[in-house]
Image (cartoon, grey):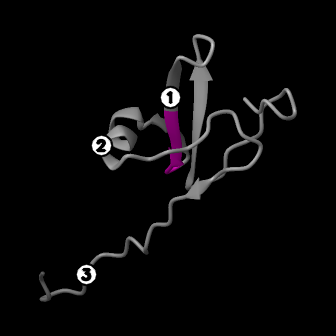
Amino acid sequence: YCAECGGRHPAEEGDLWAESSLLGLRITYMARMDGRVYDITEWAGCQRVGISPDTHRVPYHLSFGARAAAPAGRQR
């Protein structure tokens, strides 16, 4: 939910944002990954992520490297 516009914006792959509820007493952190939206509140708390909830723009964007398989015979 966007407090500035009074509506919802579509999330794009890699977006990370915060939403408030209970009159702002509860903040839930969300992320869109692999085409799905996940509640990452616990992870965000451990990382001390400080995002203002219900903002117009997405403050963080997660970036993932290529997920290609390693060449045969090569291990890490």
Where disc 1 sits, the SS reads strand
Q: Give the spatial CA distance, label 3 vs label 1.
A: 36 Å
Residue at image mark 2: 46
Percent across and percent down for residue 19 are: 60, 29
Which amino acid is tagged 2? Cys
Q: How busy is the neighbourhood of tag 1: few (under 14 within 10 Å), some, or many (20 plus)?
A: some
Using the image, determine if residue 70 lies above or below residue 19.
below
Q: How many marks?
A: 3
* Drawn side of residue 58 relative to residue 26, left or right: right
Residue at image mark 3: 70
Where disc 2 sits, the SS reads helix
Q: How busy is the neighbourhood of tag 3: few (under 14 within 10 Å), some, or many (20 plus)?
A: few
Which amino acid is tagged 3? Ala
Residue at image mark 1: 28
Range of residues picked out in magenta: 29-34
The answer to if 56 sits in the magenta stretch is: no
Sequence order check, earlier mark of 2 and 1 = 1
Q: Are marks 2 and 3 in contact (CB under 8 Å)?
A: no
Foreground: disc 3 or disc 1: 1
Percent across and percent down for residue 42 are: 34, 34
